[in-house]
Image (spheres, rainbow, N blue to C red):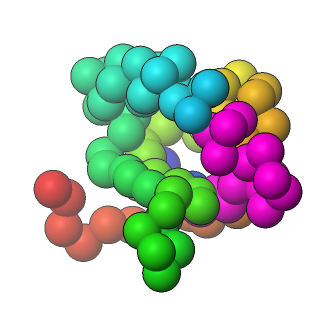
């Protein structure tokens, strides 16, 4: 198993929040399933100075980068054009929640 940090920023156009809210329920349902499977360690929204959601971070654990990419490329925030700048970095968490 490999751990990864996913950092994903939403688009900055006028419809960005509308897209996020439209895809949010499906995204959260998928993440909840992955959490049950042990593939999501922790995650949450990145907020701007006003407390508005502008992106997401996820600590994940998948069999491989390919397995992570398979999930990521099918997540509603990707297919719904919510996340527009995504980075994935291999990590090794010292403390798990």
Q: Is residue 15 left or right of residue 97?
A: right
Question: From what the image shows, is residue 11 above or below residue 79?
Answer: below
| Residue 77: image location, x then y, percent | 66, 35
> What is the tally of numbered marks visible in this picture?
0
Task: Out of 76 and 66, give the one closest to the viewer.
Answer: 76
Q: Residue at x 43, y 47 (%)?
A: 60
| Residue 84: image location, x then y, percent | 80, 52
Task: Out of 68 and 15, give the one closest to the viewer.
Answer: 15
Q: Is residue 75 left or right of residue 95?
A: right
Residue 18 lies within the magenta run: yes
Q: Residue furthest bottom?
A: 49
Q: Quadrant of the N terminus?
A: top left
| Residue 45: image location, x then y, percent | 44, 56
Q: Residue at x 84, y 57 (%)?
A: 13
Q: Residue at x 78, y 27 (%)?
A: 79
Question: Looking at the image, can residue 58 be seen?
Answer: yes
- Looking at the rendering, the stretch of residues picked out in magenta corresponds to 7-20
Residue 7, quarter of picture: bottom right
Q: Quadrant of the C terminus?
A: bottom left
Q: Is residue 83 left or right of residue 44?
A: right
Residue 40, quarter of picture: top left
Task: Out of 93 and 56, give the one closest to the viewer.
Answer: 56
| Residue 52: image location, x then y, percent | 49, 62
Question: Looking at the image, can residue 75 be seen?
Answer: no
Residue 17 lies within the magenta run: yes
Question: From what the image shows, is residue 2 above or below residue 8?
Answer: above
């Amino acid at each position: 198993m490999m751990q990864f940090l996913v950092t994903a920023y939403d688009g900055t156009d006028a419809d960005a929040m509308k897209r996020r809210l439209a895809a949010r329920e499906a995204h959260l349902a998928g993440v909840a399933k992955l959490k049950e499977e042990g593939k999501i360690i922790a995650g949450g929204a990145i907020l701007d100075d006003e407390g508005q959601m502008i992106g997401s971070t996820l600590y994940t654990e998948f069999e491989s980068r390919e397995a992570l990419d398979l999930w990521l490329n099918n997540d509603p925030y990707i297919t719904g054009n919510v996340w527009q700048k995504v980075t994935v970095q291999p990590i090794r968490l010292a403390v798990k929640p």
